[in-house]
Image (cartoon, rainbow, N blue to C red):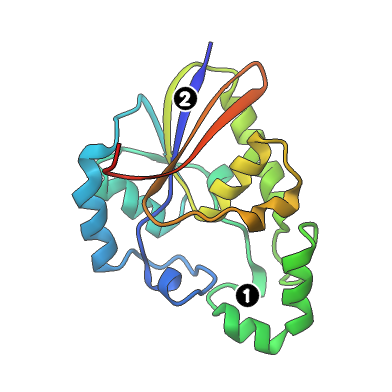
Amino acid sequence: MTVRLTLISPATSEALREVRFDDDGPLDPAGIARAEAVASAVDASPRAYTSPSRRCRGTAEALGLTAEPLDALAGCAMGRWRGQTLAAVAAAEEAGVSTWLSDPTAAPHGGESLCDLRVRVGAWLDGLADGTGRVTAVAEPDVIRAAMVHALAAPDAMVWRLDVRPLTAVHLSGRAGRWNVRAGEPLGQR
């Protein structure tokens, strides 16, 4: 019994282009167009989910997926940093950003730590491993990184070593509590 999970990162948004902590803004027009252009490359799955953010829901829609929003797939709660650019936060809270970038258990923004994010996403992932079949999820890049770290049983600090580009797919296959990872496939290229 194997579950095959495809995690798809969202298309571009203003927050992504501005290197801003997401504030639940929509996709930008170019992101919508690009997602629609690669929709035929996305295999329909009997189970489809999405992060509850507008950009993930919009990406799922543009890809032609009927996806259920799940709180377990929500991006990391960034507390008071939400909506601010990384540069602005670093200028105002240099020590906090330094701590956040070096300690995955820290949450200087008053939100969720990266470790907490990985535990939440890992619990969802482990629940899937008890089933079979194909699953597709459009998820925030930090959620996809957390899923990969969990699947590989890697240290939480590895989240900073994984890049997730817009509209790419990460494939996980799992059974018996073990996951295999195939990362970074651009949609539309197989």
Residue at x 64%, y 28% (from the top left corner): 126
Residue at x 51%, y 74% (from the top left corner): 20
138 displayed left or right of 145? left
Instruction: Identify the image quadrant of residue 134.
Output: top left
- Work out whether mark 1 precedes mark 2 in sequence or the reverse, and give the earlier one: 2
Residue at x 33%, y 64% (from the top left corner): 27
Can the viewer see residue 115? no
* Circle 1 crowding by C-alpha within 10 Å: few under 14, some 14–19, many from 20: many
**Tag 1 secondary structure:** helix
Q: Return the x and y of residue 70 as percentages of the image width and height.
A: 50, 42
Q: Which amino acid is tagged 2?
A: Arg
Residue at x 40%, y 56% (from the top left corner): 166
Q: Which amino acid is tagged 1?
A: Trp
Q: Closer to the camera: disc 1 or disc 2?
A: 2
Quadrant (top left, top right, bottom left, bottom right) of the C terminus = top left
User: Residue at the bottom extreme?
Assistant: 91
Question: Which label number is shown at residue 81?
Answer: 1
Can the viewer see residue 3? yes
Q: Return the x and y of residue 160 as percentages of the image width and height.
A: 65, 58
User: Residue at the front extreme?
Assistant: 190
149 displayed left or right of 38? right
Q: Where is mark 2, residue-wise?
A: 4
**Tag 2 secondary structure:** strand
